[in-house]
Amino acid sequence: MSYSLRLASSVNPCWQQIGVWGDRTCPELPKVTHCHNCPVFAAAGRRFLDVPSPSDYLDEWTTRLGTSDDANGGEELSLLVFRLGEEWLALSVNVLVEVTPYRTPHRIPHRGGFLEGLINIRGELHLCFRLDLLLGIERNVDKAKDRSRLVIINHDADRWAFVTDDVDQVHRLTAQTLTTAAPTLSRAATKINKGVFNLRGHSVGLIDEVKLFQAIREHAL
Amino acid sequence: MIELDDSMFEIFREDVRHHTDMLSQGLLDTEANPGNPAQVEPLMRAAHSIKGACRIIGIDLGVRLAHVMEDVLVAAQNQTIQLTPADVDLLLRGSDVLRGLTLQTPETIDTWEKANTETVTRIEPLLKQLAVGVHTETQQEPCSIAEAPSTDLSSLEHPQQVESLASSGNGFPPVPPFTEISIPTDPLVLPPNHSMLDLFREELRTQLLVIKSGLGSDYESVLESLKQIRGAARIVKSPSIERVAQALSLFISDVRDKKAELTKGGKDWLSFSVSTLAGVIGTDEESFQNWLARTNETLAEIATVFERVRTKPTQVPVKLSSAVQESINTRTDSLPPPIVPKPEATATAAPIEAVVRVTANSLNRLMGLAGESLVQARWLPSFSNSLLVLRKQHDLLASLLDRAYHAASEGASQDSLSVIIADARRQASFCRSELSEKGLTFDEHSARAEDLNTRLYREVIVSRMRPFGDGIHGLPRLVRDMARALEKEAKLTVEGEKTEVDRDILEKLESPLTHLVRNALDHGIELPEERIKAGKPRTGTIRIDARHRAGMLQVTISDDGGGVTLEKLRRKIIERGLNAPDMVRKMSEMELLEFLFLPGFSTATTVTEFSGRGVGLDVVHDTIRKVGGSVRISTSQGRGTTFHLQLPQTLSVIRAVVVDIAGEPYAFPHTRIDRLTRIHRNDIRSLEHRQFFNLDGHNIGLVFAAQLLELSSSPVVGDGLPVVLLSDSSGSYGLVVDSFRGEQDLVVRPLDTRLGKVPNLSAAAILDDGSPVLIIDVEDLIRSADQFIQTGALMRCETRSTTSVAKKRILVVDDSFTVREVERQLLVHRGYDVSIAVDGMEGWNKIRSEKFDLLISDIDMPRMNGLQLVSAIRSNEKLRDLPVVIVSYKEREEDRLRGLEVGANCYLTKSSFHDNRFIEAVEDLIGLA
């Protein structure tokens, strides 16, 4: 960065000369023990923070943030990466609402299949669907739940929750790194798959969020 | 018209609703006490406001009408004119037209304008003349006036409505739009391995063809076909189709028995039903379920329509002369619209987010409470910090005790020991006082928090309240119009208009109240001459009284009319064969009056004969019951009749009984269950594969709740089966559940609309522990139970007690493969579930992550030996009580003692495999598998 925030020249950085970062000869030092406790230091700090930003500061940041990341390969995607059974999957954060600790959904009688049940999230009841069934992924439902998380997604006021076995984190990814899905994926999964990318040796399937919501509507209800 | 967003329009509608309410109410008051300019002033302002509102939205017709109305009212206020009843009629009519605006959406405004242009053009000059003092001709039939606007309303809202009015009495609502599906005449090609469903489709195709051709002529074959469909639907487990077939056949057999012609509405609905059912023919295994899910609601609607038409045959009072009767008919059909928005109208308005009026005061209080609750929540972290200090003090105490212990074991002198102990005691008492102080603070806080939250919650409930008066705006008008038509004189007095009532309840109350008031006027209040003869004032009084009593809302509707003649009622009951004559004679007044609520008890002739009530009282009863209330009648002959309605104050909270079904909580509304009981397995009797038990001399059928809800569950264990007793007019059932949880207040939340109507459920709620609970729709459940019992698909309750199916789990830890295998096989052979670990460390990990009933361990193992493993288990909080068996080659006595010392329950040597000692020891410790 070309700009620098300099202290006003009128301030004498005594803490670097006679203070704890200098030769410790300051007569005040025995009283305050450390320059951090000294009013001179505090006043200098205050002045430092109050200094108006240099005129080119704003311009520089505007340019920096305004430049597209062409160098990195264009469009960047922010994706939440999670695990379902043995499969690693990713979903765009555009539809992500939140990730919460697991709680057992209450089954809904006469509505089995893709609908897992109702869960309470801060006093609101949400419908929970089985993403594993929707994608044809084998998953041991009764396994220990300590790493399980609920993921809440929302698209046009259509809000759903689903259970994952583990949630990694949000990763940023450029569109180029995506490759088309492997033909080994199950038919159900390919339908809503947008592509595959590699993350720490796992191959992660990216879910097409629009098709996902369509599929939920079709199958879960 | 300008572009509007929905919320703006909602405000407009709310505004118009408010002002037209005021207009119609005020006009009636003016009519009752003419010549009071102060009374007219608010009316003038109401008309003015409507004019302004219409101008903003851009409804010219509304502006025109409101403008002339305002002129008339200004003139009345200045006392340049006196309003006659005919003038009031005219103004009321104008108000009705404007009222129609409240049912519109921005899209339908144009239609409204078109439909009402004619009416407005007709009454506009009349009103203009009126404003300059030319009175409306008195000859103008009030009846036609009152009738016209509502016909206008309905015609512009839903074209079909006119038709149903025209064929008044046949009771069919308009048919939803549908296209007739042609039914293939060729048999379906069935796949070689055809399923039940394929057969059902073929069956349906044949039978529907028969029905279609037989309608209107050959009722016998239609009925036969419907019977077939019903049976087939039962086999493919589609209760909704079954219900439709049932409703249709009952309706058609009624028509056949009465030798009546099918009405147009009836025909339309029948062909609609056939077309709907024909949809099944084109489905396959997979899409059938989808079709069902999609069509479920339509099917339910069809069934309800036919059931309702059947149970409520034409209700025409006969005593009245035919002319009056006709006017009543049109009236009773046309009167409600101003107050009850038609369901279709609300459906069109549904996408608009409803705007609710909440008073500024209430909102301020809510803000205050919400802020305060935030403050209280923020107090918690600081409190938790202060607990850290307490913990440090406890650490100090612990270290003092340690010192005392060490000093004692090193044989320190008595004096120095007592000094340390004194310190420790001082520290302990300090800790104790600190702790009790903290506890006190916390108690105070929790009491405050509870109080605050209760207040917050109450305030929210209160903000949903509306004054009772808001819900009965239409009634004075109803009484006036109807009394004029019946040539009676009556007035309505209302007490407790300010009583606060939940919005939802108020909405639900409207139609029963209208019903009861209409009843009172029609059958209760006598003609003026009769009244004078009986020594009563000429004008009859209908009194409505609303008040809170004992946590319930109590509404009474009383009239000073003729009352119910109990003798005639008795005769009627005997005539209808509803009860044995000698029983009827012994019945008390209360018991007799209960008969009035029976559906169908009040058929035309009987009603007016005993000068009594009856028209649709069952409907009133049902409506009130549905919201969890009750209705009672009291009467005194010659002096009048009173209806007492008792309703809950709010619908958003219900008292419920929570039970477990298939391992998950479900709630039954408190008002809808008869009783909870436990029955012993030995008390269950069985007859023709149906199970029942005897309770107070009644045989009650047993049904498994989990089965009704189609949930898989493990059989109920134990000898006392928890049973919820439910009943409706058709009978009672005992519902077997897993266990009772208790009673609780639940805040009712509607089920997600995306789910549609889920059979047997009415709503959801959240329990104290934050887990969701589903609220059972008891009526629906009883219907399902009925179906299950009829189809005989009932699961039987095992009459002997079963033990838990979950196997006991044992962890075997040994580094020798052979030993592990021997132990595993011995145990598996005995029915235990066995898991293995190859050394102490793996065993230790396993035992912490999974649940076991017993540990069997070797001693000599790599990484962690058996003794270490056992002592680790014994010092673990959760595992401390786990039974442990050590099996080792070491046979010396001191090895055995060491094993028992670290905490093993049993020490065996490997020779024990050769006899039964190993298995016996396991069974001694944890019982049979």
Image: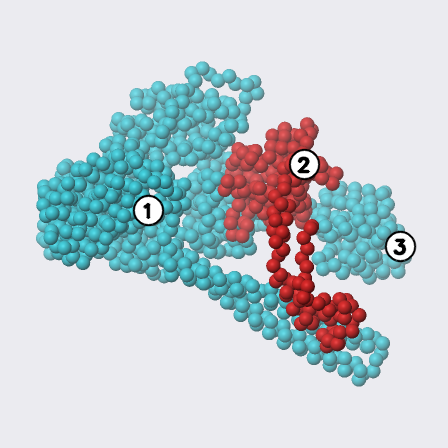
Chain colours: A red, B cyan
Q: Nearer the viewer, residue B503 or A15?
A: A15
For the residues tagged 2 and 3, is the chain the same?
A: no
Residue furthest to the front = A10
Indicate whether A195 appears above or below B483: above
- Can residue B177 be seen here? The reply is yes
Can you tell which mark lies on residue A73? Answer: 2
- Can residue B31 be seen here? The reply is no
Give percent across and percent down for residue B696: 43, 51
Q: Secondary structure at mark 1?
A: helix
Q: Which residue is mark 3?
A: B891
- At label 2, the amino acid type is Gly
Q: Check if mark 2's residue and mark 1's residue have beta carbons within 8 Å.
A: no
Q: Residues within 10 Å of mark 1 (few under 14, many from 20)?
A: some
In the image, which is nearer the foreground, mark 2 or mark 1? 2
Q: Secondary structure at mark 3?
A: loop
Q: Which residue is mark 1?
A: B12
State which chain disc 3 sits on: B
Among the two numbered marks 3 and 1 on one chain, the one whose residue lies closer to the N terminus: 1
Q: Residues within 10 Å of mark 2 (few under 14, many from 20)?
A: few
Give percent across and percent down for residue A21: 77, 67
